Amino acid sequence: MKKSVTILTLAAASSVLAACGSTGLLNRERPDEFAVQRQAPLVVPPDFNVVPPSSGAPRPSENAAEQALDVLFGGPAPRSSVETSALDRAGAADPGIRSSVGDVATNTVDKGRVTRDIVAAPQGDGQFAQAVIPQ
């Protein structure tokens, strides 16, 4: 019984596959979709009076980034009094700060696990926040 079902299944599958071939029942004349191309018509520019750039003038593409920033953010805005006072209190940064931070001779203080846990704590309103000091 199993052999006859297997043979019938193989015969049906082979006949279905044969029908999909070039000599099968589903053979139709179709255009080759890869041979079809669309070519856009030639367009003549409406004006040939192109003005040469003036000497010393910046190229239009050099100002593209500045123009984009001005369009997006509205150009430079004046700083508020709070921002100005915070910057005045902070003072000027040391120009070599990035070099000295990674230096081996830079003294660092280990704040411990509690500070690391506070900094890494999830954001929330802190209503139920508590610090657990390990003993």
Image (cartoon, rainbow, N blue to C red):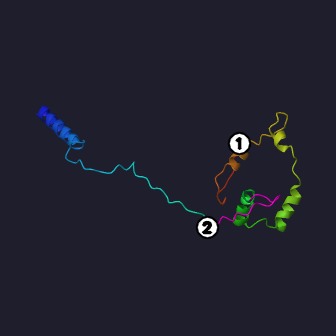
Foreground of the two, 3 or 119:
3
Report the predominant secondary structure element of the magenta stretch: loop
Decide if residue 91 is on the left or right side of residue 37.
right
Pick the residue in front: 79 or 56.
Answer: 56
Relative horizontal placement of residue 111, taking residue 117 as reference (left or right): right
- Label 1 or label 2, whichever lies nearer to me, is 2
Residue 43, quarter of picture = bottom right
* Residue 74 image position (x, y, % from top left): 74, 67
Residue extending furthest top? 3
Q: For the residue carrying disc 2, how many other residues have a C-alpha within 10 Å: few (<14), some (14-19), or many (20+)?
A: few
Which residue: 77% across, 60% down? Answer: 53
Residue 38 part of the magenta-drawn span: no
Q: Amino acid at mark 1?
A: Arg
Q: Are marks 1 and 2 in contact (CB under 8 Å)?
A: no
The front one of 83 and 18 is: 18
What numbered label is drawn on residue 50? none
> Is the residue 112 above or below the residue 70 in the image?
above
For residue 113, which numbered disc appears in the image?
Answer: 1
Q: Which mark is residue 46?
A: 2
Residue drawn where x is 66% and y is 60% of the image: 125
- Look at the image and tell me in which quarter the C terminus lies: top right
Please determine whether, in this image, residue 82 is positioned above or below residue 117: below
| Mark closest to the chain's N terminus, 1 or 2 | 2
Q: Amino acid at mark 2?
A: Pro
Q: Residue at x 79, y 58 (%)?
A: 58
**Residue 54 part of the magenta segment:** yes
The N terminus - image quarter:
top left
Could you tell whether 39 is left or right of 97 in the image?
left
Near-viewer residue (44 or 90): 44
The magenta segment: 46-59
- Label 1 CA crowd tier, 10 Å (few <14, some 14–19, many 20+): few
